[in-house]
Image (spheres, helix red, strand yellow):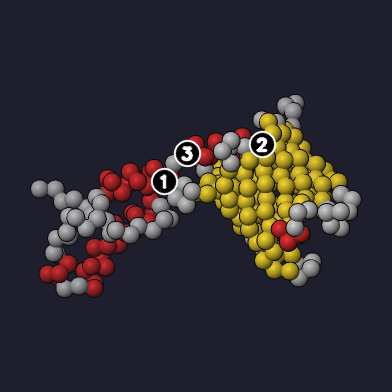
């Protein structure tokens, strides 16, 4: 009779590698920590789902889904026009230009962004990673750039149209010394060739927009 392999109820979220590690290491730990008779005791068949069921669930949760189509619509190479209100929302906006390249990575699960431009008259380079977490049912985003050493993390959701994504997070501002400033980011997909990004400082009240970037898709040469 073939023995059916059973898994513990809890499986770490880091994926298939964790499942394989559990299968390979489980018998060794049992032999070291328990008497031989106890280790040989058959597991309760009702205690956990079998391997085939666990693998099916892992495949379902790890495969890109409909929510990831939004990421593909943002992929490509873009010209960027950046407006920022460094002196406050009532002041005059400073305008600069930049370029952006967004690439789908890891089988379409994430959108990787590389941005090159200017900020306050200085060269500015940044990198981002955006995805949709099917397990937690939310969009997630990380951002790093060469004007700081921290990693900014935000999360949010799309509206019913699937063309407006709103993220919220807490951002440190080394220039003013402020930590964990609440901010909101909105990405509006206006067409296949144009999208707009807004950043809002929620501490400013109604006039909260401090940055706006308009992305226009580069024309094929």
Residue under label 2: 189
Quarter of the image holding residue 190? Answer: top right
- Residue placed at 47% from the left, 38% from the top? 65
Residue in front for this viewpoint, 184 or 99: 184
Bin the neighbour count of mark 3 within 10 Å (Cα to Cα): few under 14, some 14-19, many 20 and up.
few
Return the x and y of residue 4 as percentages of the image width and height: 18, 50
The extreme left residue here reads 1
Residue under label 3: 65
Tell me if residue 193 comes above or below residue 156 in the rendering.
Answer: above
Residue in front for this viewpoint, 69 or 89: 89
Q: Is residue 55 left or right of residue 61?
A: left
Residue under label 1: 61
The extreme top residue here reads 221
Q: Is residue 36 left or right of residue 187?
A: left
- The disc, 2 or 1, on the residue closer to the chain's N-terminal end is 1
Quarter of the image holding residue 12? Answer: bottom left
């Amino acid at each position: 009779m073939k023995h059916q392999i059973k898994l513990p109820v809890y499986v770490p979220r880091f994926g298939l590698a964790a499942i394989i590690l559990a299968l390979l290491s489980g018998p060794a730990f049992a032999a070291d920590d328990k008497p031989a008779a106890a280790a040989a005791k058959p597991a309760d068949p009702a205690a956990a789902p079998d391997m085939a069921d666990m693998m099916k669930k892992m495949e379902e949760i790890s495969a890109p889904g409909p929510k990831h189509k939004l990421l593909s619509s943002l992929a490509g190479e873009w010209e960027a026009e950046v407006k920022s209100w460094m002196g406050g929302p009532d002041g005059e906006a400073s305008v600069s230009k930049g370029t952006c390249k967004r690439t789908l990575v890891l089988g379409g699960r994430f959108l990787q962004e590389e941005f090159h431009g200017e900020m306050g008259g200085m060269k500015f380079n940044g990198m981002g990673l955006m995805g949709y977490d099917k397990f937690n049912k939310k969009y997630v985003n990380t951002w790093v750039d060469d004007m700081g050493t921290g990693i900014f993390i935000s999360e949010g959701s799309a509206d019913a149209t699937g063309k407006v994504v709103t993220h919220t997070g807490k951002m440190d501002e080394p220039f003013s010394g402020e930590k964990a400033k609440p901010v909101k980011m909105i990405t509006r997909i206006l067409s296949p060739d144009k999208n707009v990004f807004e950043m809002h400082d929620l501490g400013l009240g109604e006039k909260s927009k401090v940055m706006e970037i308009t992305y226009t898709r580069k024309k094929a040469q």
